[in-house]
């Protein structure tokens, strides 16, 4: 099966590199925070670990949807959808913004590296996320 032929994925989207894969370069037009209200049928959202107290007093760690994700529009019309906090934090800490060309690598679990290759903007506006 050619997974790239499925509607809504493949030809319209790029993906972040998986652990140990070569780095990928993305030429970003815009970055925006997408909410569940905008895309109610989407099932991939940023998750946050929370503790819940059970009836017997035990504490349980579980994941809670934050009902948002990042979506980058890329040069050429494709999109990059990011719903994992680790790469989002790496992007934010690197100061990534609209109009930048970046390289992302994921050398090992929990490690995301972001390099800014080009920046079209003279000023560094506030990161949109």
Image (tube, rainbow, N blue to C red):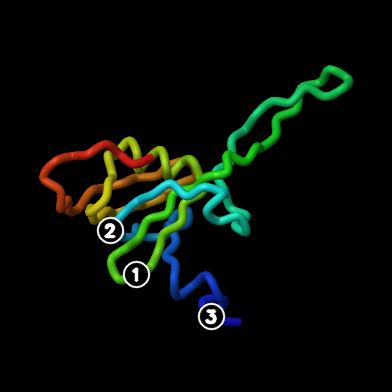
Q: Residue at x 34, y 69 (%)?
A: 77
Residue under numbered circle 3:
5
Q: Residue furthest top?
A: 57
Q: Residues within 10 Å of mark 2 (few under 14, many from 20)?
A: some
Residues under numbered marks 1 and 3 in contact, where contact means CB atoms less than 8 Å apart = no
Q: Nearer the viewer, residue 84 or 8?
A: 8
Instruction: Please identify, in this view, whether the residue under mark 2 or under mark 3 is nearer the observer.
Output: 2
- The mark nearer the N terminus, 2 or 1, is 2
* Label placed on residue 29: 2
- The mark nearer the N terminus, 1 or 3, is 3
Residue under numbered circle 1:
77
On-image quarter of the C terminus: top left
Q: Residue at x 43, y 46 (%)?
A: 33
Where is residue 54 shown, x and y percent of the image? 82, 24
**Distance between the Cα atoms at labels 2 and 1?**
9 Å
Where is residue 110 shown, x and y percent of the image? 48, 41
Q: Nearer the viewer, residue 79 or 60?
A: 79
Q: Secondary structure at mark 1?
A: loop
């Amino acid at each position: 099966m050619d997974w790239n032929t499925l509607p809504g994925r493949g030809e319209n989207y790029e993906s972040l590199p998986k652990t140990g894969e070569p780095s990928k370069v993305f030429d970003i037009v815009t970055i925006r925070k997408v909410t569940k209200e905008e895309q109610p049928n989407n099932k991939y959202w940023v998750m946050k670990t929370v503790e819940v107290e059970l009836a017997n007093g035990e504490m349980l760690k579980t994941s809670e949807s934050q009902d948002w994700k990042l979506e980058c529009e890329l040069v050429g019309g494709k999109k990059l959808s990011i719903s994992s906090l680790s790469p989002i934090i790496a992007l934010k800490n690197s100061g990534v913004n609209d109009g930048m060309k970046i390289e992302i690598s994921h050398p090992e679990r929990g490690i995301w590296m972001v390099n800014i290759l080009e920046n079209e903007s003279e000023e560094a506006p506030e990161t949109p996320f």
